[in-house]
Amino acid sequence: MLFLGIDVGTQGARGIICDEQGQVFAQGTCNFWELNTSRREGWYEQAPAMWWDAAGTVIKKCVDALKRTGRKPTEIRAVTVDGTSGTIVLLDEEKHPLRNALMYNDMRAAVQAEKIHEHAGELEKKMGYVFNASFALPKILWIKEQEPYVYEKAEYMVHQSDYIVGRLTGEYGITDYSNALKSGFDLKEEVWPELLEVLGLDRRIFPSVIPPGQVIGNITKEAAEEFGFSPDTVVAAGATDGYVSAVSTGAVKRGDWASIIGTTMVLKGVTKELFVDAGGSSYSHKLPSGDWMFGGASNIGGRCLNDFFEKEEFEMWNRGVMDVIPTKVISYPLHGRGERFPFLDPEARAFVLGDISDPQIHYAALMEGVAYAERLAFEHMQECGACVGQEIFTTGGACRSSEWLRIRASVLDRMLKVPENTGAAMGCAILAASASCYHDLPEAAGHMISYRDIIEPVYGLTSLYDELYQCAFEAYQERYQLGKG
Protein backbone atom coordinates (compact mmCIF):
# COMPACT_ATOMS: atom_id res chain seq x y z
CA MET A 1 0.00 0.00 0.00
CA LEU A 2 1.50 3.34 -1.08
CA PHE A 3 0.73 7.01 -0.41
CA LEU A 4 1.58 10.15 -2.39
CA GLY A 5 2.18 13.52 -0.77
CA ILE A 6 2.39 16.66 -2.94
CA ASP A 7 3.78 19.94 -1.62
CA VAL A 8 2.98 23.03 -3.69
CA GLY A 9 5.32 25.63 -2.26
CA THR A 10 6.58 29.11 -3.05
CA GLN A 11 9.08 28.18 -5.77
CA GLY A 12 7.78 24.88 -7.10
CA ALA A 13 6.25 21.52 -6.27
CA ARG A 14 7.66 18.43 -4.56
CA GLY A 15 6.33 14.93 -4.23
CA ILE A 16 7.07 11.80 -2.25
CA ILE A 17 5.71 8.25 -2.39
CA CYS A 18 6.07 6.02 0.66
CA ASP A 19 4.48 2.94 2.15
CA GLU A 20 2.57 2.49 5.40
CA GLN A 21 5.86 2.10 7.31
CA GLY A 22 7.26 5.38 5.97
CA GLN A 23 9.73 3.78 3.57
CA VAL A 24 10.32 6.20 0.70
CA PHE A 25 10.13 4.69 -2.79
CA ALA A 26 10.12 7.78 -4.99
CA GLN A 27 10.57 11.54 -4.92
CA GLY A 28 10.30 14.31 -7.49
CA THR A 29 10.55 18.09 -7.78
CA CYS A 30 9.66 20.73 -10.35
CA ASN A 31 10.33 24.47 -10.17
CA PHE A 32 7.75 26.98 -11.37
CA TRP A 33 8.58 28.66 -14.66
CA GLU A 34 8.47 31.98 -12.83
CA LEU A 35 8.27 33.05 -9.21
CA ASN A 36 5.75 35.46 -7.70
CA THR A 37 5.09 38.20 -10.22
CA SER A 38 4.78 41.71 -8.84
CA ARG A 39 3.31 44.65 -10.70
CA ARG A 40 4.03 46.91 -7.77
CA GLU A 41 5.64 46.68 -4.35
CA GLY A 42 3.80 44.30 -2.03
CA TRP A 43 1.73 42.72 -4.82
CA TYR A 44 2.52 39.07 -5.52
CA GLU A 45 0.61 36.85 -7.93
CA GLN A 46 0.94 33.46 -9.63
CA ALA A 47 -1.00 31.71 -12.39
CA PRO A 48 -2.77 28.60 -11.01
CA ALA A 49 -2.06 26.82 -14.31
CA MET A 50 1.60 26.94 -13.32
CA TRP A 51 0.82 25.12 -10.05
CA TRP A 52 -0.97 22.36 -11.93
CA ASP A 53 1.81 22.01 -14.52
CA ALA A 54 4.39 21.69 -11.73
CA ALA A 55 2.25 19.29 -9.70
CA GLY A 56 1.58 17.14 -12.76
CA THR A 57 5.28 17.02 -13.61
CA VAL A 58 6.08 16.00 -10.03
CA ILE A 59 3.50 13.22 -10.09
CA LYS A 60 4.95 11.86 -13.34
CA LYS A 61 8.51 12.01 -11.97
CA CYS A 62 7.44 10.20 -8.82
CA VAL A 63 5.56 7.55 -10.81
CA ASP A 64 8.54 6.99 -13.13
CA ALA A 65 10.87 6.63 -10.14
CA LEU A 66 8.39 4.28 -8.46
CA LYS A 67 8.26 2.00 -11.49
CA ARG A 68 12.06 1.65 -11.38
CA THR A 69 11.70 0.12 -7.92
CA GLY A 70 9.35 -2.54 -9.24
CA ARG A 71 6.25 -1.03 -7.63
CA LYS A 72 3.20 0.19 -9.57
CA PRO A 73 1.30 3.51 -9.41
CA THR A 74 -1.94 1.51 -9.11
CA GLU A 75 -0.71 0.63 -5.59
CA ILE A 76 -1.09 4.29 -4.54
CA ARG A 77 -4.05 4.23 -2.17
CA ALA A 78 -4.37 7.93 -1.34
CA VAL A 79 -3.03 11.35 -2.34
CA THR A 80 -2.87 14.53 -0.27
CA VAL A 81 -1.81 18.06 -1.28
CA ASP A 82 -0.60 21.07 0.70
CA GLY A 83 -0.18 24.72 -0.30
CA THR A 84 0.96 28.08 0.99
CA SER A 85 -1.15 29.67 3.73
CA GLY A 86 -3.36 32.60 2.72
CA THR A 87 -3.05 32.10 -1.06
CA ILE A 88 -6.41 32.32 -2.87
CA VAL A 89 -7.93 32.39 -6.35
CA LEU A 90 -11.50 32.89 -7.60
CA LEU A 91 -12.95 30.51 -10.20
CA ASP A 92 -15.88 30.91 -12.60
CA GLU A 93 -18.70 28.41 -13.11
CA GLU A 94 -16.48 26.42 -15.49
CA LYS A 95 -13.89 26.24 -12.67
CA HIS A 96 -11.42 28.39 -14.57
CA PRO A 97 -9.39 31.06 -12.71
CA LEU A 98 -10.83 34.53 -13.15
CA ARG A 99 -7.47 36.16 -12.46
CA ASN A 100 -4.05 35.25 -11.11
CA ALA A 101 -3.96 34.02 -7.52
CA LEU A 102 -3.12 36.48 -4.75
CA MET A 103 -0.21 34.89 -2.93
CA TYR A 104 0.46 34.32 0.77
CA ASN A 105 2.90 37.27 0.85
CA ASP A 106 0.69 39.70 -1.09
CA MET A 107 0.08 42.69 1.17
CA ARG A 108 -2.16 44.88 -1.01
CA ALA A 109 -5.24 44.32 1.20
CA ALA A 110 -4.09 46.34 4.22
CA VAL A 111 -7.13 48.65 4.08
CA GLN A 112 -9.47 45.69 3.81
CA ALA A 113 -7.73 43.95 6.72
CA GLU A 114 -8.32 46.98 8.91
CA LYS A 115 -11.98 47.07 7.85
CA ILE A 116 -12.36 43.38 8.76
CA HIS A 117 -10.61 43.98 12.06
CA GLU A 118 -13.20 46.62 12.95
CA HIS A 119 -15.99 44.03 12.61
CA ALA A 120 -14.22 40.83 13.68
CA GLY A 121 -13.37 41.53 17.31
CA GLU A 122 -15.39 38.62 18.66
CA LEU A 123 -13.97 36.13 16.16
CA GLU A 124 -10.41 37.39 16.65
CA LYS A 125 -10.72 37.09 20.40
CA LYS A 126 -12.17 33.59 20.12
CA MET A 127 -9.54 32.33 17.68
CA GLY A 128 -6.56 34.20 19.13
CA TYR A 129 -5.38 36.02 16.02
CA VAL A 130 -5.69 39.43 14.36
CA PHE A 131 -6.62 39.78 10.70
CA ASN A 132 -3.82 41.28 8.63
CA ALA A 133 -3.14 41.80 4.95
CA SER A 134 -1.46 38.40 4.55
CA PHE A 135 -4.72 36.60 5.46
CA ALA A 136 -6.97 35.28 2.69
CA LEU A 137 -10.19 37.04 3.74
CA PRO A 138 -8.87 40.60 3.21
CA LYS A 139 -7.65 39.55 -0.25
CA ILE A 140 -11.12 38.31 -1.18
CA LEU A 141 -12.61 41.60 0.02
CA TRP A 142 -9.98 43.52 -1.99
CA ILE A 143 -11.06 41.73 -5.17
CA LYS A 144 -14.71 42.51 -4.41
CA GLU A 145 -13.98 46.20 -3.88
CA GLN A 146 -11.25 46.80 -6.46
CA GLU A 147 -12.17 44.29 -9.17
CA PRO A 148 -15.98 43.88 -8.92
CA TYR A 149 -16.08 42.65 -12.52
CA VAL A 150 -14.02 39.64 -11.34
CA TYR A 151 -15.86 39.07 -8.08
CA GLU A 152 -19.30 39.11 -9.73
CA LYS A 153 -18.33 36.11 -11.90
CA ALA A 154 -16.94 34.07 -8.99
CA GLU A 155 -18.52 30.69 -8.24
CA TYR A 156 -15.70 29.26 -6.12
CA MET A 157 -13.14 30.70 -3.72
CA VAL A 158 -10.29 28.19 -3.53
CA HIS A 159 -6.93 28.01 -1.80
CA GLN A 160 -3.76 26.86 -3.52
CA SER A 161 -4.03 23.20 -2.52
CA ASP A 162 -7.80 23.21 -3.22
CA TYR A 163 -7.09 24.04 -6.85
CA ILE A 164 -4.79 21.02 -7.28
CA VAL A 165 -7.32 18.81 -5.49
CA GLY A 166 -9.97 20.09 -7.89
CA ARG A 167 -7.86 19.20 -10.91
CA LEU A 168 -7.38 15.69 -9.49
CA THR A 169 -10.97 15.02 -8.36
CA GLY A 170 -13.24 17.55 -10.07
CA GLU A 171 -14.31 18.74 -6.58
CA TYR A 172 -13.50 22.43 -5.98
CA GLY A 173 -15.93 23.19 -3.17
CA ILE A 174 -14.12 21.58 -0.22
CA THR A 175 -11.15 22.77 1.83
CA ASP A 176 -9.52 21.85 5.13
CA TYR A 177 -9.33 23.37 8.62
CA SER A 178 -5.90 24.93 8.20
CA ASN A 179 -6.45 26.62 4.84
CA ALA A 180 -9.84 27.90 6.01
CA LEU A 181 -8.38 29.61 9.09
CA LYS A 182 -7.07 32.69 7.27
CA SER A 183 -10.27 32.88 5.23
CA GLY A 184 -12.18 33.61 8.44
CA PHE A 185 -13.66 30.18 9.22
CA ASP A 186 -14.71 29.78 12.86
CA LEU A 187 -12.78 26.67 13.86
CA LYS A 188 -14.39 26.44 17.29
CA GLU A 189 -17.96 26.37 15.99
CA GLU A 190 -16.94 24.93 12.60
CA VAL A 191 -19.04 27.41 10.63
CA TRP A 192 -18.46 30.34 8.32
CA PRO A 193 -19.27 33.35 10.52
CA GLU A 194 -21.87 36.06 10.00
CA LEU A 195 -18.86 38.32 9.42
CA LEU A 196 -19.02 37.36 5.73
CA GLU A 197 -22.49 38.90 5.36
CA VAL A 198 -21.41 41.98 7.33
CA LEU A 199 -18.63 42.46 4.78
CA GLY A 200 -21.02 41.93 1.88
CA LEU A 201 -19.33 38.70 0.79
CA ASP A 202 -21.30 35.87 -0.78
CA ARG A 203 -21.16 32.85 1.54
CA ARG A 204 -22.09 30.65 -1.41
CA ILE A 205 -18.61 30.84 -2.96
CA PHE A 206 -16.88 29.75 0.24
CA PRO A 207 -16.05 26.02 0.45
CA SER A 208 -17.21 23.34 2.83
CA VAL A 209 -14.57 22.69 5.49
CA ILE A 210 -13.38 19.27 6.69
CA PRO A 211 -10.49 18.01 8.84
CA PRO A 212 -7.10 17.40 7.19
CA GLY A 213 -6.85 13.75 6.20
CA GLN A 214 -10.56 13.26 5.50
CA VAL A 215 -11.32 11.80 2.08
CA ILE A 216 -12.64 14.32 -0.48
CA GLY A 217 -13.23 11.95 -3.38
CA ASN A 218 -11.80 9.55 -5.91
CA ILE A 219 -9.33 10.50 -8.58
CA THR A 220 -11.01 11.36 -11.90
CA LYS A 221 -10.91 8.92 -14.79
CA GLU A 222 -8.81 11.43 -16.76
CA ALA A 223 -6.24 11.85 -13.96
CA ALA A 224 -6.09 8.09 -13.37
CA GLU A 225 -5.31 7.51 -17.04
CA GLU A 226 -2.77 10.36 -17.23
CA PHE A 227 -0.78 9.30 -14.19
CA GLY A 228 -1.42 5.57 -14.07
CA PHE A 229 -3.42 5.59 -10.83
CA SER A 230 -6.13 3.14 -9.97
CA PRO A 231 -9.65 4.60 -10.30
CA ASP A 232 -10.02 3.59 -6.64
CA THR A 233 -7.25 5.98 -5.56
CA VAL A 234 -8.68 8.64 -3.26
CA VAL A 235 -7.66 12.23 -2.60
CA ALA A 236 -7.82 13.37 1.03
CA ALA A 237 -7.86 16.89 2.44
CA GLY A 238 -4.39 18.29 2.97
CA ALA A 239 -3.35 21.39 4.89
CA THR A 240 -1.04 24.39 4.72
CA ASP A 241 2.67 23.80 4.21
CA GLY A 242 3.63 24.76 7.77
CA TYR A 243 0.96 22.47 9.21
CA VAL A 244 2.11 19.38 7.32
CA SER A 245 5.78 20.17 7.96
CA ALA A 246 5.01 19.95 11.69
CA VAL A 247 3.12 16.68 11.10
CA SER A 248 6.20 15.25 9.35
CA THR A 249 8.25 15.63 12.53
CA GLY A 250 5.85 13.47 14.54
CA ALA A 251 4.45 16.30 16.66
CA VAL A 252 0.82 15.14 16.51
CA LYS A 253 -0.12 14.24 20.12
CA ARG A 254 -0.86 16.49 23.07
CA GLY A 255 2.35 17.85 24.54
CA ASP A 256 4.38 17.30 21.35
CA TRP A 257 6.32 20.26 19.98
CA ALA A 258 8.00 20.76 16.61
CA SER A 259 10.73 23.30 15.98
CA ILE A 260 11.44 23.76 12.28
CA ILE A 261 14.49 25.90 11.57
CA GLY A 262 15.20 26.50 7.91
CA THR A 263 15.46 29.97 6.43
CA THR A 264 13.17 31.03 9.27
CA MET A 265 11.96 29.38 12.47
CA VAL A 266 8.52 27.82 12.97
CA LEU A 267 7.24 26.41 16.28
CA LYS A 268 4.13 24.24 16.51
CA GLY A 269 2.83 22.39 19.57
CA VAL A 270 -0.22 20.23 20.22
CA THR A 271 -2.51 21.45 23.01
CA LYS A 272 -5.87 20.35 24.36
CA GLU A 273 -7.14 23.92 24.66
CA LEU A 274 -7.08 26.79 22.21
CA PHE A 275 -4.68 29.30 23.75
CA VAL A 276 -4.87 33.01 23.02
CA ASP A 277 -1.67 35.01 22.66
CA ALA A 278 -2.36 38.50 23.97
CA GLY A 279 0.70 39.76 22.12
CA GLY A 280 -0.78 38.61 18.81
CA SER A 281 2.27 36.72 17.51
CA SER A 282 0.79 33.20 17.73
CA TYR A 283 -2.36 31.41 16.65
CA SER A 284 -3.76 27.88 16.57
CA HIS A 285 -4.68 25.45 13.83
CA LYS A 286 -7.12 22.63 14.51
CA LEU A 287 -6.07 18.98 14.27
CA PRO A 288 -8.39 16.19 13.07
CA SER A 289 -8.57 14.95 16.67
CA GLY A 290 -10.06 18.25 17.84
CA ASP A 291 -6.84 19.22 19.60
CA TRP A 292 -5.04 22.42 18.60
CA MET A 293 -1.70 23.14 16.96
CA PHE A 294 -0.41 26.30 18.64
CA GLY A 295 2.57 28.32 17.51
CA GLY A 296 3.96 30.85 15.11
CA ALA A 297 6.57 31.66 12.48
CA SER A 298 9.57 33.92 13.09
CA ASN A 299 11.70 36.02 10.76
CA ILE A 300 14.84 34.73 12.46
CA GLY A 301 16.47 31.47 11.40
CA GLY A 302 19.22 29.80 9.40
CA ARG A 303 19.25 32.64 6.89
CA CYS A 304 21.57 34.53 9.24
CA LEU A 305 24.47 32.19 8.33
CA ASN A 306 23.95 32.96 4.64
CA ASP A 307 24.03 36.68 5.42
CA PHE A 308 27.67 36.47 6.56
CA PHE A 309 29.18 33.22 5.26
CA GLU A 310 29.31 31.31 1.99
CA LYS A 311 27.28 28.12 2.03
CA GLU A 312 30.28 26.19 0.72
CA GLU A 313 32.18 27.17 3.88
CA PHE A 314 29.60 25.93 6.39
CA GLU A 315 31.19 22.52 6.84
CA MET A 316 34.59 24.07 7.55
CA TRP A 317 33.20 26.48 10.16
CA ASN A 318 31.08 23.73 11.73
CA ARG A 319 34.23 21.77 12.59
CA GLY A 320 35.50 24.56 14.83
CA VAL A 321 32.25 25.43 16.62
CA MET A 322 32.67 23.20 19.68
CA ASP A 323 36.10 24.74 20.36
CA VAL A 324 34.76 28.27 20.84
CA ILE A 325 31.39 27.84 22.58
CA PRO A 326 29.95 29.38 24.58
CA THR A 327 31.12 32.50 22.77
CA LYS A 328 29.59 34.88 25.34
CA VAL A 329 28.31 36.96 22.41
CA ILE A 330 24.69 38.03 22.74
CA SER A 331 22.76 38.67 19.54
CA TYR A 332 19.42 38.52 17.80
CA PRO A 333 20.53 37.79 14.20
CA LEU A 334 17.39 39.05 12.48
CA HIS A 335 17.36 39.37 8.70
CA GLY A 336 15.99 42.77 7.70
CA ARG A 337 13.54 44.82 9.74
CA GLY A 338 10.62 43.52 11.78
CA GLU A 339 9.74 40.44 13.82
CA ARG A 340 6.46 38.52 13.91
CA PHE A 341 7.12 35.72 16.42
CA PRO A 342 7.59 35.21 19.36
CA PHE A 343 6.81 38.92 19.55
CA LEU A 344 5.36 41.47 17.16
CA ASP A 345 7.65 44.41 16.52
CA PRO A 346 7.66 45.91 13.00
CA GLU A 347 10.71 48.03 13.85
CA ALA A 348 12.85 45.24 15.33
CA ARG A 349 16.40 45.03 14.00
CA ALA A 350 19.34 42.72 14.59
CA PHE A 351 21.89 43.52 17.28
CA VAL A 352 25.20 42.08 18.50
CA LEU A 353 26.83 42.52 21.92
CA GLY A 354 30.39 41.21 21.97
CA ASP A 355 33.46 40.77 19.78
CA ILE A 356 32.82 38.91 16.52
CA SER A 357 36.00 39.91 14.73
CA ASP A 358 37.08 36.25 14.72
CA PRO A 359 34.95 34.63 11.98
CA GLN A 360 34.85 31.30 13.84
CA ILE A 361 33.38 33.02 16.89
CA HIS A 362 30.99 34.99 14.68
CA TYR A 363 29.75 31.79 13.02
CA ALA A 364 29.17 30.05 16.36
CA ALA A 365 27.57 33.16 17.86
CA LEU A 366 24.99 33.24 15.06
CA MET A 367 24.04 29.67 15.93
CA GLU A 368 23.76 30.63 19.59
CA GLY A 369 21.67 33.69 18.72
CA VAL A 370 19.11 31.56 16.90
CA ALA A 371 19.09 29.10 19.82
CA TYR A 372 18.39 31.93 22.28
CA ALA A 373 15.51 33.09 20.06
CA GLU A 374 14.19 29.52 20.00
CA ARG A 375 14.24 29.40 23.81
CA LEU A 376 12.50 32.79 23.94
CA ALA A 377 9.79 31.34 21.68
CA PHE A 378 9.26 28.25 23.84
CA GLU A 379 9.09 30.38 26.98
CA HIS A 380 6.52 32.58 25.27
CA MET A 381 4.43 29.48 24.52
CA GLN A 382 4.59 28.58 28.22
CA GLU A 383 3.59 32.12 29.22
CA CYS A 384 0.51 31.70 27.01
CA GLY A 385 -0.43 28.63 29.05
CA ALA A 386 0.99 25.79 26.94
CA CYS A 387 3.00 22.94 28.44
CA VAL A 388 6.38 22.25 26.80
CA GLY A 389 7.94 18.88 27.64
CA GLN A 390 11.52 17.65 27.59
CA GLU A 391 11.48 16.34 24.01
CA ILE A 392 11.40 18.58 20.94
CA PHE A 393 10.89 17.20 17.42
CA THR A 394 12.99 19.21 15.02
CA THR A 395 13.76 19.49 11.34
CA GLY A 396 14.95 22.03 8.77
CA GLY A 397 18.31 23.02 7.37
CA ALA A 398 19.72 23.80 10.82
CA CYS A 399 19.55 20.07 11.60
CA ARG A 400 22.29 19.36 9.05
CA SER A 401 24.80 20.65 11.60
CA SER A 402 25.33 18.32 14.56
CA GLU A 403 27.14 21.17 16.31
CA TRP A 404 24.15 23.44 15.99
CA LEU A 405 21.89 20.69 17.31
CA ARG A 406 24.10 20.35 20.41
CA ILE A 407 24.04 24.12 20.98
CA ARG A 408 20.25 24.21 20.69
CA ALA A 409 19.76 21.19 22.98
CA SER A 410 22.03 22.81 25.58
CA VAL A 411 20.39 26.25 25.39
CA LEU A 412 16.92 24.69 25.61
CA ASP A 413 18.05 22.02 28.11
CA ARG A 414 15.87 19.59 26.20
CA MET A 415 16.31 16.52 24.00
CA LEU A 416 16.06 17.10 20.26
CA LYS A 417 14.71 14.33 18.00
CA VAL A 418 15.49 14.57 14.29
CA PRO A 419 13.26 12.49 11.96
CA GLU A 420 14.71 10.45 9.10
CA ASN A 421 12.37 11.83 6.43
CA THR A 422 10.70 15.19 6.86
CA GLY A 423 9.18 18.03 4.91
CA ALA A 424 5.77 19.12 3.74
CA ALA A 425 5.43 16.36 1.13
CA MET A 426 6.19 13.70 3.75
CA GLY A 427 3.63 15.27 6.09
CA CYS A 428 1.07 15.04 3.28
CA ALA A 429 1.89 11.36 2.75
CA ILE A 430 1.31 10.74 6.46
CA LEU A 431 -2.06 12.52 6.24
CA ALA A 432 -2.92 10.41 3.20
CA ALA A 433 -2.14 7.23 5.15
CA SER A 434 -4.24 8.42 8.09
CA ALA A 435 -7.18 8.72 5.68
CA SER A 436 -7.04 5.27 4.18
CA CYS A 437 -4.84 2.94 6.21
CA TYR A 438 -4.69 3.96 9.87
CA HIS A 439 -7.28 4.84 12.47
CA ASP A 440 -6.02 8.37 12.98
CA LEU A 441 -3.10 10.75 12.47
CA PRO A 442 -1.13 9.77 15.62
CA GLU A 443 -1.28 6.10 14.61
CA ALA A 444 -0.09 6.91 11.09
CA ALA A 445 2.77 9.07 12.39
CA GLY A 446 3.76 6.40 14.91
CA HIS A 447 4.20 3.82 12.15
CA MET A 448 5.68 6.06 9.45
CA ILE A 449 8.20 8.27 11.27
CA SER A 450 11.62 7.10 12.43
CA TYR A 451 14.42 9.20 13.93
CA ARG A 452 17.97 9.45 12.67
CA ASP A 453 19.36 11.52 15.56
CA ILE A 454 18.52 12.05 19.22
CA ILE A 455 20.56 14.90 20.69
CA GLU A 456 20.97 15.35 24.45
CA PRO A 457 22.08 18.62 26.12
CA VAL A 458 25.86 18.81 26.51
CA TYR A 459 26.91 18.34 30.13
CA GLY A 460 28.53 21.52 31.43
CA LEU A 461 27.10 23.78 28.76
CA THR A 462 23.52 23.97 30.02
CA SER A 463 24.31 26.04 33.12
CA LEU A 464 26.61 28.36 31.17
CA TYR A 465 24.00 28.88 28.49
CA ASP A 466 21.31 29.48 31.10
CA GLU A 467 23.29 32.46 32.44
CA LEU A 468 23.95 33.79 28.95
CA TYR A 469 20.30 33.42 27.98
CA GLN A 470 19.26 35.54 30.96
CA CYS A 471 21.59 38.27 29.64
CA ALA A 472 20.10 37.84 26.18
CA PHE A 473 16.56 38.15 27.55
CA GLU A 474 17.44 41.43 29.29
CA ALA A 475 18.87 42.72 26.00
CA TYR A 476 15.66 41.74 24.19
CA GLN A 477 13.57 43.57 26.77
CA GLU A 478 15.61 46.73 26.25
CA ARG A 479 15.30 46.67 22.46
CA TYR A 480 12.05 44.97 21.45
CA GLN A 481 8.32 45.13 22.10
CA LEU A 482 8.13 41.70 23.69
CA GLY A 483 4.55 42.19 24.83
CA LYS A 484 2.80 39.88 27.23
CA GLY A 485 1.59 36.32 26.77
Image (cartoon, rainbow, N blue to C red):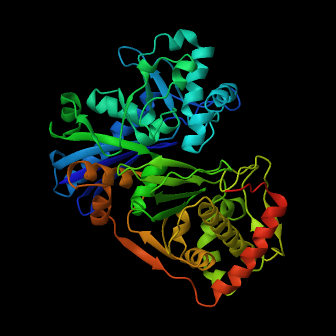
Specify whether residue 114 is in view.
yes
Residue at 39%, 30% (x, y): give it: 163
> Relative to residue 368, is residue 84 drawn left or right?
left
Q: Which of 55 and 406 is in front in this view?
A: 406
> Relative to residue 419, is residue 480 drawn left or right?
right
Residue lying farthest bottom? 460
Q: Nearer the viewer, residue 33 or 437?
A: 437
In which quarter of the view is residue 164 placed? top left
Image quarter in which the C terminus is found: bottom right
Residue at 59%, 90% (x, y): give it: 459
| Residue 280 coordinates in the image, percent (x, y) | 66, 47
Image vertical order of residue 428 relative to residue 87, above or below? below
Q: Nearer the viewer, residue 129 or 86?
A: 129
In which quarter of the view is residue 353 placed? bottom right
Image vertical order of residue 112 relative to residue 315, above or below? above
> Relative to residue 144, is residue 67 drawn left or right?
left
> Relative to residue 261, is residue 7 drawn left or right?
left
| Residue 165 coordinates in the image, percent (x, y) | 33, 34
Image vertical order of residue 50 relative to residue 469, above or below? above
| Residue 177 coordinates in the image, percent (x, y) | 42, 40
Specify whether residue 396 is in view.
no
| Residue 159 coordinates in the image, percent (x, y) | 45, 32
